[in-house]
Amino acid sequence: LLRLQLGTTNITSRTFQGLDQLQYLFLEHHAPCCLSLSLPPNCLESLRSLSSLSFQGYCLTYSQSIYLPTSLRHLTMRNSCLTNLQELQRLFPDLLLSASSTPNTKPRALFLEMLDLSYNLQLKQAGVRDLSVLTLHSLILDGTPLRALDLIMSGLLHLQFLSLVGTGITKLPASVTGYSELRALDLGKNKIQNILENGDLPVYKALEFLSLHDNHLQSFPIRFLRTLPQLQKLNLSMNKLGPILELPEGPFITNLKVLDLSHNQLCDVPHGAFSFLSQLQELWLSGNNISSLSNESLHGLRWLRTLDLSWNQIKVLKPGWLSSLP
């Protein structure tokens, strides 16, 4: 692993020679404004084992056609002056080899698992079909103004993990429903009050992890969650679901194993509130205003292994309050 916090240092084609075992390379500049960094096209050619490459706080405007090792799996460009996704094709042609390559261009098998473009505050555009040839599992766009509709138009549809933390969205955009193969979706630190404002039910049949932490939810999104048959982890912490927790009756996301309701201004856990979450293994209730618990409050959680009640106002624990948690 090599981490370089560079100023105006020049990188040449021989800077990284001899580092053929290097797996992680981080180039970082921690300042309010990004710093211009020019990279020769072949400066990474000797890094045959490189798995993760990260640029943070650098503007690569004066670089182009940078060679990427075929071993690369994670690419990060944070806090840069990136304005549209099409710039990636200029910077890293190997990443987006198009069908229009000349006969002299030899295609290389480059499979990128994760692309992190977080906190590029000018990233607002994604050209039509810009990413249609990119095979990608995870895309992280935290803190960017890029719209979900732009992602659909870019041709990138086969994601398994999408993170849109802190993007300022107020509702789950209908266009995101095109990602039917998503297994994990993080929409934390936004302004979502009601997932179903327009009445449409998004389709996430494969979703296993969903985070809506630190939003403005005032009610449990029951109707939406009923459409997630594979959901195993649900994070609803730091919302406004209190003072009384209201969960649905009847069969409900039966595969759910982890539920986080921390910091939701909850004062009371009604009898049998979790009785239909029969497979739940972790329940996080910290940072609420719960004052008492009884056996009936936790009834039905026979597979529970972890219970967090820290930072509450608990004054009464009734006899046998843990008897339903073997």
Image: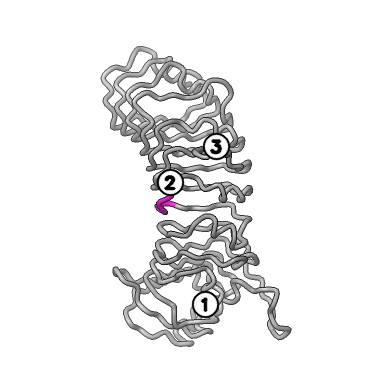
Task: Tell me residue 150's x, y (percent).
Answer: 54, 60
Which numbered disc covers residue 170? 2
Which numbered disc covers residue 199? 3
Task: Give the CA distance from mark 1 to mark 3.
Answer: 41 Å
The numbered mark, 2 or 3, whose residue comes first in the sequence reads: 2
Task: Tell me residue 295's x, y (percent).
Answer: 41, 15
Q: What residue is shown with label 1?
A: 91
The numbered mark, 1 or 3, whose residue comes first in the sequence reads: 1
* Amino acid type, residue under disc 2 in the picture: Thr
Confirm or deny contact between disc 2 and disc 3 (CB under 8 A): no
- Indicate whether 269 appears above or below 28: above
Task: Give the CA distance from mark 2 to mark 1.
Answer: 33 Å
Closer to viewer: mark 1 or mark 3: 3
* Amino acid type, residue under disc 1 in the picture: Leu
For the residue labelled by badge 2, is the local secondary structure a helix, a strand or a loop? Answer: loop
Residue 168 belongs to magenta span: yes
Task: Tell me residue 169's x, y (percent).
Answer: 43, 49
| Magenta residues (range) | 165-169
Task: Tell me residue 225's x, y (percent).
Answer: 54, 34
Closer to viewer: mark 2 or mark 1: 2
Instruction: Tell me if 325 is positioned left or right of 29 in this view.
Output: right
Quadrant of res 319:
top left
